[in-house]
Image: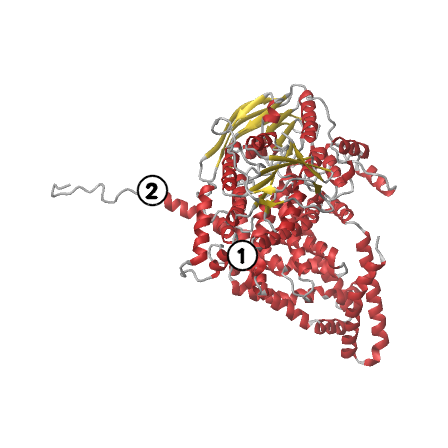
């Protein structure tokens, strides 16, 4: 097989499915290895486990409603607070755990990749999704992002169909057939954002604030900057002398 | 093994979906392709079923084990997640039960019920986070994140793998520590605002049992956490100074303040055994524990289980064991003879007398090997007999006498349940009665209270206060303690509180004062409160409801003498106002108190309840 044949094959549906899957798999595999190597605290391992367990439980809980589940929002919030790498770890564990109850298939891999992308997107778009000091989540941008991911997520998971059918037509049919379900996912995401995002945000923010200590200092930069500014301000206010203290009254009344 | 019924259930869901999908494909691609589409769908269904059978056939623990080969630390995360899923479910059940007990689901409107149930999820998630912290600390202290130390090189391991042989990990063999074990402390523990809660300057040598005493919140558990090498801020605290451990079998000299450590630096048995067990089965708990301390042998596990009277629980899941049994399982699996320092944080609270004797034997043996044992205990009468050194933290207060009061018994208010589980010939409980229920671990004391509660519609308080706390902050918790208060909180903020809601608010605030909780800030997260404060906060709705019988499970757990005597005074007060009180406990001190108060003592054995004569 010469180079030209490989290039030709790479533009076929089967080829696209293979190289895209490999590229994404390698990229997120690298992120996972990096999370694994960096993990030094049992609490970090347990936090990732808990978030994955909660996301999986919520997915199983809403299994009766077709394609309506809060996992996408959970992963968006985790990406926002804990960054792309840990969101990738949670995404992978969530796909593994929830499919233990709902059934594994080729989609497990694509779900993990799609949720990893979801988490990475919110980590990258953090400045747009939280207010100036990171204490509140902006509901409208978050809802728009969650709505877009409702469709994108399902299309990425549908890549398994591209790999199986090896035909653009069958893939498009697959996507068209699932549009109603994609819309349900998207609208479900918006509803979950309105319902859960503010309290989930404050909980994760409080948790991070609570955890910040000698062995684990990873508060958001804006929070640290704000606190330093406020404490400096307080200190300088304390040191400020009475501006009139060194002025002597010339009329002799003082 | 996959059964016929499981496959039938799977087919019932997936076959109609596949047919539907085939019909959609037919609609879009034209009817002339029907044969191709049937072929495609049948291939798809076969592939799915094959994959599903594979999923069913591989147990989750095998998935974890294979995962650990590639991503060892995320493998630990997966193991914890598998353990957490049933616990999250259990925690949600406790919360729904609490809502029901507080009268929240009596409304006719389903939407209202749903809204109320939805309102408890932040508290549930906050509790789950706290629980995950506990599991994370257990992982850290047991060194499970440390890289594995293989007994053989990579080539020999590959060869063993190819031959299907067991690949062994190296461990530390138990040995005598001679006089090498020393723990030097020169540290101060401070609260976030800078207030010190503990100053320690001691040199503790191996071959001693040290009993650490002090009131709640004096920093005993934080000190033990620090020595165990886990985050000391279970509640936010910072540590200043140095702590040096010498005689560690792997690390030799350890400066504990340089933590965290990947290796286990001591053997730490924390409070609340139901929150610190990692594995999903009794056998795997042993496997995990022995993974680091040496080669695991089944014989050793069986002998240890027999010593701790857990042999019949080998096939049980840890969450199905009673608190006492879970405590014994943690001790049996994790008391690591290779570690020079043992830290026992109220490890005996759930143990019956026989269990405590077993623990005492293990501790004395460890002392004889030259190990150092540090014990935190509120009911220290048991430990004082074998402790070599007693260390006082915080204010040196005289031991409190529990307040005793003689209450005249009134009319009959109930009898314990008689069903398949329990039988008895006891006289009925009368108003003002005090009943203390005793029994060995696993004899069914908690089950008795639960059954009694569901039979007679009485509220009861389980051992762990977290099971009866619904809110994320103190304010949320207080609102969720009564449906009327909750309804009132949903109204506009400027609406003035009147009628029943105002009465309840005033009752609640006076009870807060009586229980010594009026100092609490409303914005404090519930899990930042001390065990004693959480216990009293969870008792508040029971006092508000004033049931004819108060059912309280191990009321003394996690409380210092002063807090406990304060709480017992409140209980006496309730008795005087005509309420009967039923308490379960292993504590000899509480038994003595019950007798002095003219209380009755019941004993459970094999489901038979009998009255113990004075």
Mark identifier at residue B570: none
Q: Split into 4 quadrants, where in the image is the N terminus of chain A?
A: bottom right
Task: Please state the chain letter of the residue tagged with numbered disc 1 in the rendered image.
Answer: A
Image location of residue A100, percent across then percent down? 74, 55
Q: Earlier in the sequence, mark 2 or mark 1?
A: 1
- Tell me the quarter of the image containing the C terminus of chain A: top left
Q: Nearer the viewer, mark 2 or mark 1?
A: 1
Relative to residue A131, is residue A36 depicted above or below?
above
Q: Residue furthest right?
A: B163
- Give me the residue at 60% from left, 39% from top: B583
2 and 1 marks on the same chain: yes
Q: Nearer the viewer, residue B567 or B114?
A: B567
Position of B309 with respect to A150 (left or right) is right
Is B530 in front, or is A23?
B530
Element under disc 2: helix
Position of residue B116 measured from the top left corner of the image (x, y, whole percent):
56, 59
- Residue B180, can we see it? yes
Q: Which mark is residue A238?
A: 2
Label 2: how many Cα within 10 Å (few below 14, some 14–19, many 20+):
few
Question: Could you tell whether B30 is left or right of B95 in the image?
Answer: right
Residue sitting at x 82%, y 53%: B57
Which of the chains bears the disc numbered 2?
A
Q: Compared to B328, does B205 lie above or below? A: above
Horizontal and vertical percent position of residue B146: 68, 38
C-beta proximity under 8 Å, tags 2 and 1: no
- Describe the element under mark 1 as helix, strand or loop: helix
Q: Which residue is mark 1?
A: A199
Comparing B612 with A184, the one in front is B612
């Amino acid at each position: 097989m010469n180079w030209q044949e490989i290039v030709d094959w790479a533009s076929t549906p089967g080829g696209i499915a293979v190289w895209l899957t490999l590229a994404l798999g390698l990229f997120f595999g690298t992120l996972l290895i990096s999370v694994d190597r960096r993990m030094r605290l049992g609490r970090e391992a347990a936090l990732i486990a808990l978030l994955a367990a909660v996301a999986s439980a919520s997915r199983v809980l809403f299994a009766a409603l077709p394609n309506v589940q809060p996992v996408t929002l959970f992963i968006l919030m985790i990406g926002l607070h804990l960054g792309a790498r840990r969101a990738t770890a949670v995404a992978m564990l969530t796909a593994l755990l929830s499919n233990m109850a709902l059934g594994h298939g080729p989609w497990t891999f694509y779900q993990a990749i799609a949720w990893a992308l979801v988490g990475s997107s919110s980590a990258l778009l953090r400045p747009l999704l939280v207010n100036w000091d990171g204490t509140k989540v902006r509901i409208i941008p978050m809802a728009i992002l969650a709505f877009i991911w409702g469709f994108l997520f399902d299309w990425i998971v549908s890549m398994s169909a591209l790999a199986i059918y090896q035909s653009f037509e069958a893939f498009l049919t697959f996507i068209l057939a699932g549009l109603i379900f994609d819309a349900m996912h998207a609208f479900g995401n918006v509803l979950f954002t309105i319902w859960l995002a503010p309290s989930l945000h404050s909980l994760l923010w409080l948790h991070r604030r609570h955890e910040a200590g000698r062995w684990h200092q990873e508060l958001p930069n804006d929070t640290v900057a704000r606190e330093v500014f406020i404490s400096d301000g307080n200190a300088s206010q304390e040191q400020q002398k009475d501006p009139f203290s060194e002025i002597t009254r010339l009329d002799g009344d003082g | 093994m996959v059964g016929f019924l499981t496959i039938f259930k799977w087919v019932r869901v997936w076959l109609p979906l596949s047919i539907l999908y085939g019909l959609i494909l037919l609609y879009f691609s034209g009817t002339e392709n029907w044969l191709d589409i049937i072929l495609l769908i049948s291939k798809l269904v076969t592939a799915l079923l094959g994959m599903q059978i594979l999923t069913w056939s591989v147990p989750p623990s095998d998935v974890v084990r294979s995962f650990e080969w590639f991503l060892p630390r995320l493998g630990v995360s997966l193991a914890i997640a598998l353990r957490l899923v049933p616990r999250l479910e259990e925690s949600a059940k406790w919360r729904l039960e609490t809502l029901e007990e507080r009268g929240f689901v009596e409304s006719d409107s389903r939407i209202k019920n749903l809204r109320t149930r939805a309102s408890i999820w932040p508290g549930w998630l906050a509790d789950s986070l706290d629980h995950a912290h506990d599991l994370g600390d257990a992982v850290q202290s047991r060194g499970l994140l440390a890289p594995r130390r293989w007994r053989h090189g990579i080539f020999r391991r590959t060869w063993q793998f190819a031959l299907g042989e067991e690949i062994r990990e190296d461990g530390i063999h138990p040995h005598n520590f001679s006089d090498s074990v020393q723990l030097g402390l020169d540290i101060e523990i401070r609260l976030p605002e800078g207030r010190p809660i503990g100053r320690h300057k001691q040199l503790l040598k191996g071959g001693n049992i040290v009993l650490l005493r002090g009131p709640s919140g004096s920093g005993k558990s934080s000190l033990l956490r620090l020595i165990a090498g886990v985050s000391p801020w279970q509640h936010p605290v910072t540590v200043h100074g140095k702590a040096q451990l010498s005689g560690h079998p792997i690390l030799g000299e350890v400066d504990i303040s340089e933590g965290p450590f990947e290796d286990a630096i001591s053997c730490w048995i924390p409070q609340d055994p139901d929150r610190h067990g990692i594995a999903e089965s009794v056998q795997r708990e042993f496997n995990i524990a022995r993974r680091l301390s040496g080669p695991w042998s089944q014989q050793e596990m069986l002998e240890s289980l027999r010593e701790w009277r857990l042999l019949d629980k080998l096939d049980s899941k840890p969450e199905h064991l009673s608190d006492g049994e879970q405590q014994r399982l943690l001790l049996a699996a994790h008391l690591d003879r290779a570690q020079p320092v043992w830290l026992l944080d109220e490890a005996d609270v759930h143990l019956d007398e026989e269990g405590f004797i077993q623990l005492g034997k293990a501790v004395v043996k460890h002392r004889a090997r030259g190990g150092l044992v540090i014990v935190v205990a509120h009911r220290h009468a048991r430990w004082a007999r074998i402790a070599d050194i007693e260390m006082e933290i915080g204010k040196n207060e005289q031991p409190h006498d529990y307040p005793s009061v003689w209450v005249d018994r009134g009319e009959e208010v109930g009898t314990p349940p008689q069903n398949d589980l329990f039988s008895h010939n006891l006289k009925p409980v009368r108003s003002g009665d005090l009943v203390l229920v005793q029994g060995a671990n696993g004899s069914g004391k908690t089950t008795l209270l639960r059954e009694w509660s569901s039979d007679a519609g009485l509220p009861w308080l389980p051992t762990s206060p977290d099971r009866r706390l619904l809110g994320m902050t103190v304010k949320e918790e207080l609102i969720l303690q009564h449906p009327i208060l909750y309804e009132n909180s949903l109204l506009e903020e400027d609406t003035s509180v009147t009628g029943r809601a105002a009465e309840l608010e005033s009752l609640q605030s006076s009870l807060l004062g009586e229980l010594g909780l009026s100092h609490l800030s409303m914005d404090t997260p519930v899990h930042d409160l001390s065990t004693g404060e959480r216990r009293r906060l969870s008792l508040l709705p029971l006092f508000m409801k004033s049931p004819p019988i108060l059912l309280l499970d191990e009321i003394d757990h996690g409380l210092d003498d002063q807090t406990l005597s304060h709480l017992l005074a409140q209980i006496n007060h309730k008795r005087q106002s005509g309420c009967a009180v039923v308490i379960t406990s292993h504590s000899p001190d509480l038994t003595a108190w019950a007798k002095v108060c003219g209380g009755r003592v019941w004993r459970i054995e094999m489901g038979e309840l009998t009255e113990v004569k004075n």
